[in-house]
Every structure is written in C-alpha cells, then in structure tokens.
Image (tube, coloured by chain):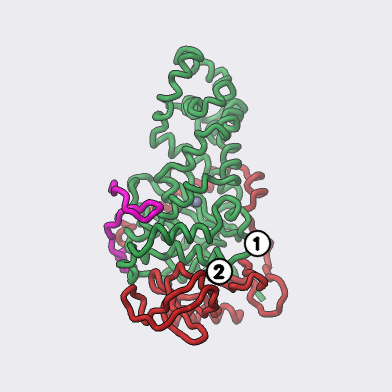
Amino acid sequence: MTRTRTWVAACMLLGCSAAWAQETGYTLRETEVKAKPFLDAQSVGKLPEKAQVTILGRQGGWSQIRADKVEGWIRLLSMRLGSADPAKKPTAVATTIGFGRRGTGAGPTVTTGVRGFSEEDLKEAKPNPEEVKKMETFTIPPAGAAQFAAAGGLTAQTVSYVDADGKPVKVKK
Amino acid sequence: MNARLLLCAVVLVGAVGIVAGCAGPQGQAFMDNIGGVEGLMKNIKQATGTIQEPEEIEMGEGITETLLGARPMVNDPEVQRYVNFVGAWVAAQSDRPNLPWHFAVNDSDHVNAFAAPGGYIIVTKGMMNLLQNEAELAGVLGHEIGHVVRKHHLNAIRKGAYMNLLGAGAAGATAGSRGGELVNALVGPTKELYSRGLDKDDEFDADRIGVVLATRAGYDPWGLAAALQTLAKIKADDKYMALLFKTHPNPSDRLDKLGTAMGTTFDRFNDRPQNADRFQRAVAKIRMVAAN
Ligand SMILES: [Zn+2]
C-alpha cells in the first residue's frame, strides 16, 4: 500500500473533508474575516487582495482559513485555490488527483496508459450500443432514489431557480 | 414517427440541410407527403414542435452510443449504481422528473462530464477522482441535468451548423434498423457538438440550474462552486482538462457568475450535508493512484 493510499484512508477515518494535502488559496479582493461562517458573525480582521491563505475547511459558502495574522472564515467565492503568484507553477490534474504525488519532482507515474477522452478519441469513436444497454440497466426507480436520499440525511427543499443576477425565477415544479 | 421522418423534421428546422437530409428515396417520399418545397418551408415552423419526448430519448440514446464508443463504462457496478442513485435523486427535483434518467462513469482519466438529450449523463472517472464529496457530485450532475432539462444539446443540433452533418449522415446511412439509421446520422453531429461545446450562456445557465437542483435535493448548495474551485486551480494546458476547458467557459469566470447568481440566497442551506464519507466509499475502487 502506498503512502498516499494510507493517507487517504486515515483522512477518511478522521472524517476530514478537504484534500489530504494542505490546500492553499488567495483572496481575489479585500476580504473580511469572520469568527464564524455567518454574515452577521463578528469580524476578526481583514485580508488585502491577493493575501495567501491556508484552507482548513469549508462550510457551505464559507472557507475556513489561516493567514499570517488571522484565522477565521471568508466567503468561498472571494478566494481561489492555489497561489496568487502567477510565476508559481499552476497545479496539474495528476497532482490534484494524487497519482503524481510522489514528491520526487518526477512526472506522474501512471502504470497503465492514459485512458483519454480527448477530441481525437471522440473523433475516432464508433457507436457502442451494447454499452448504452448496459448503462440503462443501472437506472434507479424514484422510490429507490428517495430511500438513498433519506439514508444520506437529505431532505428535499423548496428553492426557486435564479437568474444571472440572482433574482428568483418562477418555479415550475 | 419513424427515424427518417424525425431526421427530416430535425433537418427542416435548420433549413440548411433540406436537400441533404431528405434527398434519399424515403426522404423524397416524405417531401411528397407534405407537398414539395413550398410545403416544406411552410412546415419548418411546425417541425420545431415535432420532436417529442420519445424521439428526444431516441436521439439521446444514439448520441450516447458514440460517447460510450469513445470510452466505455468503468467496470465497477458499485460506482455505477452510486452515480445513478445521486443522479436520480437530483433529477427528481427537476422540471422533467419522469424522464428515464441514466447515469454512468466512463473509464477515462480525463476530467469531464457529458449530457445527451432524453436524460443520458456520463461522468468521467477522472472527474470522480477530482471531486471530494457527494454535494460536489450532485452539483456536477445537476449541471448536466440542467442541459437536458433546458434541451441545450437538442437545440444546438437543430441549429444550422449541425444540419449538414446530420443530413449527410442520414443520406449516407445504409439500410438497417430504424435505430441504426438514426445513430448513423447522429455520429457526425455528436462528434462536432461534443468537441465544440455549447454556447457559453447555456453553460452559465446549467451552472445555476445545477446549484438549485442540488439544493432542492437537500445538499450543501456550494458543491458545484467547490468543484469549480478545484478545476480553477488547474493549469489551462493540462491534457486531462483539454476537452472540458475547450468546451466550457473557464472555471474562474463560471465562479464569478455563480457568485453573482448565488449571492447569499443559498446561505440558509449552508449546513446541509456534503456526504464525503459515502462518496469516498463509493469511489474507493476507481481511485487513480500510481501503483508503486
Ligand atoms: Zn456543461
């Protein structure tokens, strides 16, 4: 078992929701830091634009962060993941997913060839009716879906669609 | 309605492919049926309304045959069942709860997800590896369900650009079953549409629908935003992202638009479940980890 795998397992046992690596991010604009993930929570500080933060977790639309001098909650969409410094090499999928996470500086170590779905793969595709038939066998009836939802602590909510400005759109349902 | 008539109807809407689409012997019969070119033009408007749900589903099935032809499903019944549970529950909150919704994880390392008319939705194994919890998956599936509910792909295929391809496919289709003919005709448009992508506005629209459907389903509303945050940190030329980045607006723009659309309206659901444990268990067997 690889170290990454063990790490993932430990992470699952402890119930940490973020990726196993320490996630970092940066603010897009001047951002207020709150003591709790609520709009009316007490403010514990302010971060300037492009302040580097360490992500500790997320609740709904709030990210729990630690910065140089302050720790607390900022709006999820007032930040982006990664580094504010464009010179820092951006993240690759391989490292995000984990199969490049060896820390050797070498590229991703994928044992089998890449199973792509590139434009080329699409161009060369031949229709595969058997796969569609197979896909159709997994279909879940409505009662089954409701049971699955209940088992996951999910209860249906009434919410309107919203337009681009966030105004409610008439609900058809 | 047989497939040939459906094809002709679809082609007619685009007006571009009238000759190409209906030039075969059967097409000629169809033309005679509705009374020559003048009649055809008159029927273009009516044809818009003729793609009923069964035909839409048939088209979706044909498109999906090509999409799964590019990469088949991943061989893990558990994860297939799981995405169908999540997908069916989210789709049940949509305006088209009675479509026969089908979901699949394909065996692709690339990060992407696809929707086809009639309720066929595919998520790649790469995408499943990038997501962190069920709320994120619900948001991603909600986005795809949004494309189906709003008939984005169906409408795109009706537009002129795909009509010649559809017509050519129909004319070149060899005799066979009705379904086979339709699939043949759809191969060209499918490849073109799914490598070119939809209009940006359709994508932003699908993002907003995805958020609302996931919220209605009882999830943390910010799952799609969190997934887009992960996508946003990945370099633009990453080969695993190439097709997704080509066919969708860039993730940072999508996040900006979602931020405006979501505002604080969804905050009352901030404490709803993300179901990370159930998600991690479901994807355990398709984890992409180097074996050394
Ligand atoms: Zn989309």
Q: Is residue A84 left or right of residue A61?
A: right
- Mark 2 vs mark 1: same chain? yes
- Residue B101 in the image: state x and y as whole percent: 40, 49
Which of the 4 image quadrants contains residue B47? top left
Q: Residue at x 51, y 29 (%)?
A: B14
Q: Is residue A171 within the magenta segment?
A: yes
Chain shown red: that is: A
Q: Cα distance, mark 2 to mark 1?
A: 19 Å
Compare marks 2 and 1 and give the one earlier in the sequence: 1
Measured as percent of width and height from the top left, residue A20 is found at 53, 78
Look at the image and give the residue range highlighted in magenta.
Answer: A149-173
What secondary structure is the magenta-colored segment mainly? Answer: loop
The crowding category of the residue bearing disc 2, from other C-alpha atoms within 10 Å (few below 14, some 14 to 19, many at least 20), is: some
- Residue B75 can be seen, yes or no: no
Vertical comparison of B31 with A58: above or below: above
Q: Chain of mark 1?
A: B
Q: Is residue A106 visible?
A: yes
User: Which chain is displayed in green in the rendered image?
Assistant: B
Which residue was labeled with disc 2? Answer: B287
Q: Which mark, by number, is residue B238?
A: 1
Is residue B281 toward the left or the right of residue B16 in the image?
left
Q: Secondary structure at mark 1?
A: loop
Task: Give whichever of A20, A77 is nearer the camera.
Answer: A77
